[in-house]
């Protein structure tokens, strides 16, 4: 199969050989037509879904990706085994990719951004892309030092095979198909919706410089992972439902486990974050300002340069600052700071850093004008 690669290393082909077992596993769910659907199998399905959705949220995500709490080496291994029984690759791969996602959320370098590559690719296609197959252990050195996790990294399907065997031993073929296969397929898409739908549909409480959203339906499906905008506002929090009414069973279970000393050092968001009074970091301000600046029409500036009949005039204009260009050559006026501020208030939720975003967007727009001038001069 031929493919193209852009400057970011993205391959535009979407059908990969590695996806074949994944697709066949979905078809295996239809084997219930022959095995039947027993009551025991349905209970196995429900139990495996509940246990393993907790393992995904608490294990893959909050512990291995974000170190939101501390636990013993024994429980760490148990969490890793339960998480990997979902057949969503191994914990080192999962956490490394997720840490990369947070570094570049919804930018060109993000591994699964609906904005950049489309909904389907963000939901499932990226998992099977060749450039995402390997594990970048430099992103997760804190856990790559444990031999037992490296062993799971090499034998990533071992926990799933054990779980499937247990389901078969309890419920026979129906237990295997309905109990294990059905619950695993449901877990696939509940998890994948956080990468796709939670960056498309829902509400935003915080300015995070990306498209993360809170989605109450996904929170129900994933035991609290759907409060995704909250999570992006303070990633290391063990609690993702910041309000009392935001359903977050993963946090509740971890809290109970902390009473018995199984986990400890549960990290919570600062009061300033809960009140949405925290100052935003430079990276978030820069990304938000770029989004804001992009909403203004700069094409008129390019058209103005293209229509300039006098080469000397173009060269003289290119050496000027943006304000001088507009005044002397009657160029299309760039928006004032007040106009940028009005659009920012309509575009972003409340933040104490709104003025910082507006100021940076104002600079970006004027730098763009001067860039076009320099480019025309070179041309």
Image: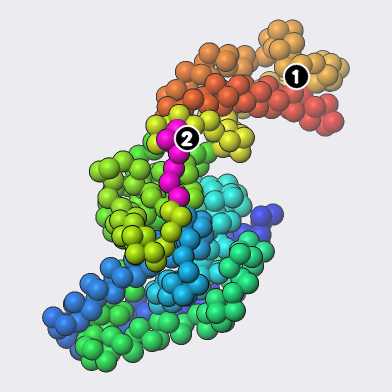
Most common SS among magenta residues? loop
Residue 190 placement, left or right of 288: left
Q: Give yes or no for residue 268 being in the magenta stretch.
A: yes
Q: Nearer the viewer, residue 252 or 283?
A: 252
Residue occupying image coordinates x 49% and y 25%: 352
Q: Does 154 sit above or below residue 223?
A: below
- Residue 117 makes an appearance in the image: no
Quadrant of residue 371 in the image? top right
Residue occupying image coordinates x 84% and y 16%: 316
Quadrant of residue 357 in the image? top right
* Residue 161 disc label: none
What x and y, as percent, mark residue 93?
55, 69
Q: Nearer the viewer, residue 352 or 284?
A: 352
The quadrant in which the C terminus is found is: top right
Q: Does 264 sit above or below residue 146?
A: above
Q: Which residue is mark 2?
A: 207
Cα gap from disc 2 to disc 1, whole angstroms: 40 Å
Q: Which residue is mark 1?
A: 308
What x and y, as percent, mark residue 164?
34, 85
Residue occupying image coordinates x 39% and y 64%: 261
**SS class, disc 2:** loop
Quadrant of residue 36 in the image? bottom left
- Residue 335 makes an appearance in the image: yes
The quadrant in which the N terminus is found is: bottom right
Q: Nearer the viewer, mark 2 or mark 1?
A: 2
Residues packed near mark 2 inside 10 Å, few (<14), some (14 to 19) or many (20 plus) = many
Q: Does 333 sit above or below residue 222?
A: above
**SS class, disc 1:** loop
Q: Which one is earlier in the sequence, the residue at label 2 or at label 1?
A: 2
Q: Range of the magenta residues?
A: 267-272
């Amino acid at each position: 199969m031929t493919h193209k690669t852009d400057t970011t290393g993205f391959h535009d082909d979407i059908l990969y050989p590695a996806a074949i077992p994944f697709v066949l596993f979905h078809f295996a769910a239809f084997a219930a037509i022959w095995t039947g659907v027993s009551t025991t199998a349905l209970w196995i399905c429900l139990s495996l879904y509940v246990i393993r959705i907790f393992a995904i949220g608490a294990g893959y995500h909050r512990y291995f990706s974000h170190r939101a709490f501390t636990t013993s080496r024994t429980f760490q291994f148990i969490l890793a085994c339960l998480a990997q029984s979902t057949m969503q690759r191994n914990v080192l791969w999962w956490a490394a990719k997720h840490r990369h996602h947070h570094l570049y959320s919804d930018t060109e370098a993000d591994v699964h951004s609906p904005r950049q590559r489309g909904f389907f690719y963000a939901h499932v296609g990226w998992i099977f892309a060749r450039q995402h197959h390997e594990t970048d252990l430099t992103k997760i050195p804190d856990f790559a030092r444990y031999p037992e996790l490296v062993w799971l990294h090499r034998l990533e399907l071992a926990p799933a095979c054990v779980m499937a065997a247990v389901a078969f031993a309890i419920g026979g073929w129906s237990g295997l198909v309905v109990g294990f296969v059905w619950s695993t397929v449901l877990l696939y898409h509940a998890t994948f919706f956080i990468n796709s739908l939670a960056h498309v549909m829902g509400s935003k409480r915080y300015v995070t410089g990306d498209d993360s959203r809170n989605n109450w339906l996904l929170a129900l499906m994933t035991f609290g992972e759907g409060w995704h905008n909250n999570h992006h506002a303070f990633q290391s929090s063990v609690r993702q439902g910041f309000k009392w009414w935001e359903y977050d069973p993963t946090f509740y279970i971890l809290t109970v486990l902390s009473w018995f000393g199984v986990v400890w050092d549960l990290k919570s968001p600062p009061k300033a974050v809960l009140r949405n009074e925290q100052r935003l970091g430079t990276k978030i301000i820069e990304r938000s300002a770029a989004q804001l600046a992009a909403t203004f029409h700069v094409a008129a500036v390019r058209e103005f340069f293209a229509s300039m009949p006098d080469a000397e005039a173009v060269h003289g204009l290119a050496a000027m600052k943006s304000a001088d260009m507009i005044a002397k050559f009657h160029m299309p006026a760039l928006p004032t700071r007040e106009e940028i501020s009005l659009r920012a208030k309509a575009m972003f939720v409340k933040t104490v850093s709104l003025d910082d975003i507006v100021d940076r967007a104002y600079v970006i727009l004027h730098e763009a004008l001067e860039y076009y001038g320099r480019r025309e001069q070179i041309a």
